[in-house]
Image: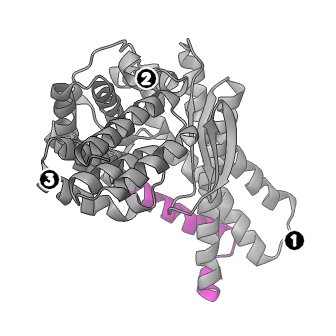
């Protein structure tokens, strides 16, 4: 399995680089057609700034396209981020916060309404970013045709924004796996062909919908059974959800089976999911006295974990401080802090499980230390 995934990932990288090279050549041709090919030689820093600003705007327009189509189709917003601005669902209400930049522009997480079975709507939602990128690119380039007396430095920026918007749309339309994640084009193909990989994505959405509505992982009914050995990319999230279900059921055997699978495949798992998995590897190591493994993985996420003040991050810190550093007051404080932020956790069903895990540790600390 791992060999085939690496081979697929390698082929995707080759295709991605090929597309980027074609795009670069196309951009040089556009510069020549519009007689601005010497701009980057005259103003290299301004040219570079234009590129990053245009790329940032293009990414955010793409994600806004998903959000716009999602709202029109009745999808429920979980999280939407635009640079430092974050909107997330808390207690069935959208809460706005300002967060620290993390190196990417934007993302949009939405789930379909309960009982949703329309593949047509799934395709439209998935294609929303591509459609809006195309529209934006065309509108921006039309401005150059309508106004012919635009100063060169503005013309180059408009030209770059329009070109990047259309290129980004085409890039996402071509079916690819990027860092083991299917892009929009690949997802659309999977939906049309009704591939098992897309059904898994649907089951993940159902699972998350139930967690968001307040159902605990142990009470969620799994619709389908899949061979997890064939899962990769974003669909690894399905195994994480199965792990949470086993964790909430206190089924040690299943917990170990899922966490071992995730650990074995961690190098080919999308980076955003790796931290969640390492959290749970550390947790399992604490409760099973595998302290060497905990120390090995804890160093990989320690810096980010110290800044994580959600209930799950505080849980890991509390267990680590008690079982590894053998402290008493600090883990108790982490437990108290975790319970104080419970209302901010977007997945209410998962929060109920977290409360129980926190209280289990509190009782252990109090009992073992005669407090």
The quarter of the rendered structure image containing the N terminus is top left
Q: Which image quadrant for residue 213?
A: top right
Outermost residue on the bottom side: it is 42
Q: What residue did someone put label 2 on?
A: 216
The image's colour scheme reads one colour
Q: Residue at x 63, y 28 (%)?
A: 76
Q: Is residue 221 above or below residue 170?
A: above
Disc with the residue nearer the chain's start (1 vs 2) = 1
Q: Is residue 35 magenta?
A: yes
Q: Which circle marks residue 267 in the picture?
A: none
Left or right position of 243 against 7: right
Q: Give percent across and percent down for residue 330.
A: 37, 58
Q: Is residue 44 above or below residue 162?
A: below
Q: What residue did someone put label 3 on?
A: 291
- For residue 123, say whether it is visible: yes
Q: What residue did someone put label 1 on?
A: 149
Q: Which residues are magenta?
A: 17-44
Cβ atoms at labels 2 and 3 below 8 Å apart: no
Outermost residue on the front side: it is 370
Q: Give percent across and percent down for residue 48.
A: 58, 76
Q: Give percent across and percent down for residue 266.
A: 23, 47
In three-dimensional space, the C-alpha distance between marks 2 and 3, rounded to whole angstroms, equals 29 Å
Disc with the residue nearer the chain's start (2 vs 3) = 2
Q: Is residue 192 above or below residue 126?
A: above
Q: Residue at x 37, y 46 (%)?
A: 315
């Amino acid at each position: 399995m791992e060999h085939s995934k690496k081979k697929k990932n390698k082929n995707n990288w080759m295709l991605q680089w090929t597309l980027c090279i074609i795009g670069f050549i196309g951009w040089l041709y556009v510069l020549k057609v519009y007689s601005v090919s010497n701009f980057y030689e005259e103003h290299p820093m301004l040219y570079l700034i234009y590129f990053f600003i245009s790329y940032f705007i293009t990414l955010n327009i793409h994600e806004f396209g998903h959000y716009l189509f999602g709202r029109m189709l009745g999808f429920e917003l979980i999280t939407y981020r635009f640079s430092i601005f974050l909107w997330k669902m808390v207690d069935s209400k959208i809460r706005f916060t300002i967060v620290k930049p993390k190196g990417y522009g934007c993302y949009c997480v939405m789930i379909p309404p309960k009982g949703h079975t329309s593949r047509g709507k799934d395709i439209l939602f998935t294609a929303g970013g591509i459609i809006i990128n195309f529209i934006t690119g065309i509108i921006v380039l039309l401005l150059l045709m309508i106004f012919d007396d635009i100063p060169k430095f503005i013309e180059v920026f408009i030209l770059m924004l329009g070109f990047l918007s259309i290129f980004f749309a085409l890039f996402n339309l071509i079916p690819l796996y990027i860092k083991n994640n299917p892009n929009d084009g690949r997802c659309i193909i999977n939906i049309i062909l009704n591939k098992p990989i897309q059904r898994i994505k649907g089951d993940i959405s159902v699972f998350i919908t139930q967690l968001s509505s307040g159902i605990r992982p142990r009470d969620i009914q799994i619709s389908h059974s899949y061979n997890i050995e064939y899962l990769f990319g974003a669909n690894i999230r399905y195994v994480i959800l199965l792990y949470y279900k086993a964790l909430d059921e206190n089924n040690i055997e299943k917990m170990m089976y899922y966490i071992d699978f995730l650990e074995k495949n961690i190098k080919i798992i999308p980076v955003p999911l790796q931290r969640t998995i390492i959290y749970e590897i550390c947790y399992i190591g604490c409760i099973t006295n595998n302290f060497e493994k905990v120390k090995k993985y804890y160093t990989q996420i320690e810096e980010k974990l110290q800044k994580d003040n959600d209930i799950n991050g505080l849980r890991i810190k509390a267990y680590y401080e008690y079982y590894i550093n053998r402290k008493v007051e600090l883990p108790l404080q982490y437990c108290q802090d975790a319970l104080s932020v419970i209302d901010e956790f977007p997945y209410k069903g998962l929060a109920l499980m977290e409360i129980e895990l926190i209280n289990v540790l509190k009782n252990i600390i109090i009992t073992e230390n005669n407090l």
